[in-house]
Image (tube, rainbow, N blue to C red):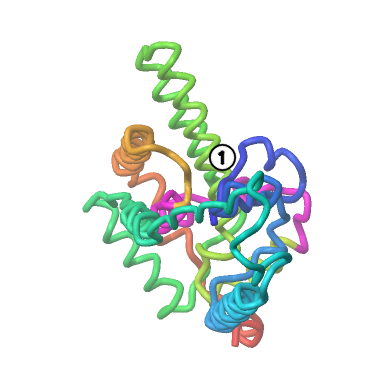
């Protein structure tokens, strides 16, 4: 199953995910709202396994049921010679390719790793929350990066690529934030934000710490894109360049003073 984020889909109020099945039947592919995508939790994984077993059982039953014309003598109509069986494709070939693609890794610079640890500690152990809306939101960080790259006199093609990469990062962030980028303690805060700002993009509310978390997770998502090795390597180089920009500006983007202790009533909601 391929999960792609279309750059035009996020212009509407609801983010959509493209579900492209690993099949030659394009009619099976569809755009679905994020609400139809199950969260990556144990209960949903168990449900997936049960559906897969049921599907395999159905296929086996179909194979056992003889089709029309089966079981007749070999002396049939000579104008319709028996069909040759299609050679079966070794499933391990495609599976091997898929496994190789799963190994997509976005390298987090050493200078940023301590901040990821501090971010985790502030929220999960110290029970603090990043103050929202952020003083400098994700949109602002990405816009500053794009302007920085353009100011260095890049060619038109590189400038176009920067715009595309920035737009892609923003859309991945919007789609993945609610399902993969939050700690459990932050979920009530996220629910309040959605309720109070239903028409506002989350990239206009959250800031650099949550954006940095995206790069820990984005490699797994890139494994599902239909990019060839050359295109994927180019994309990774752009992502690494953006991470270098975060390192260069880390003093202004990451600060423990941007967190605040959650009040007692919030703790009751977070239990």
Give the magenta-colored segment's residue range.
195-223
Judging by the rendered image, the residue that carries numbered circle 1 is 139
Instruction: Check the image and report above or below for 161 versus 24.
Output: above
Instruction: Please tell me which residue lies in front, 18 or 212.
Output: 18
Instruction: Report the side of 100 relative to 9 (left or right).
Output: left
Element type at mark 1: helix
Picture residue at 72% right of the left edge, 48% below the top: 200
Residue 157 picture quarter? top left
Instruction: Report the side of 215 relative to 77 (left or right).
Output: left
Residue 202, position as x, y percentages in the image: 63, 51
Instruction: Report the side of 269 relative to 197 (left or right).
Output: left
How many numbered marks appear? 1
Instruction: Check the image and report above or below for 123 versus 106.
Output: below
Picture residue at 77% right of the left edge, 60% below the top: 196
Residue 132 in view in this figure: yes
Instruction: Check the image and report above or below for 125 versus 196.
Output: below
Position of the N terminus, as image quadrant, is bottom right
């Amino acid at each position: 199953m391929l999960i792609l984020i279309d750059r035009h889909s996020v212009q509407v109020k609801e983010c959509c995910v493209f579900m492209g099945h690993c099949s030659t039947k394009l009619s099976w592919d569809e755009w679905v709202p994020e609400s139809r995508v199950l969260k990556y939790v144990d209960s949903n994984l168990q449900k997936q396994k049960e559906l897969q077993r049921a599907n395999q059982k159905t296929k086996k039953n179909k194979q056992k049921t003889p089709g029309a014309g089966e079981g007749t003598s070999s002396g049939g109509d000579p104008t319709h010679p028996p069909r040759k069986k299609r050679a079966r494709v070794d499933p391990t070939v495609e599976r091997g390719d898929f496994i190789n693609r799963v190994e997509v890794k976005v390298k987090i610079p050493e200078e940023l790793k301590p901040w990821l640890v501090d971010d985790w500690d502030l929220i999960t152990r110290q029970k603090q929350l990043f103050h929202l809306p952020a003083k400098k939101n994700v949109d602002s960080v990405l816009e500053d990066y794009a302007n920085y790259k353009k100011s260095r006199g890049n060619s038109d093609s590189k400038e176009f690529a920067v715009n595309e990469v920035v737009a892609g990062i923003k859309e991945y962030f919007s789609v993945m934030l609610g399902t993969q980028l939050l700690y459990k303690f932050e979920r009530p805060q996220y629910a309040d934000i959605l309720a109070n700002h239903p028409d506002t993009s989350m990239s206009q509310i959250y800031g650099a710490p949550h954006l940095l978390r995206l790069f820990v997770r984005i490699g797994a998502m890139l494994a599902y894109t239909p990019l060839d090795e050359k295109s994927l390597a180019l994309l990774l180089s752009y992502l690494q360049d953006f991470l270098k920009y975060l390192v260069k500006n880390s003093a202004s983007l990451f600060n423990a003073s941007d967190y605040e202790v959650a009040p007692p009533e919030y703790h009751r909601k977070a239990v």
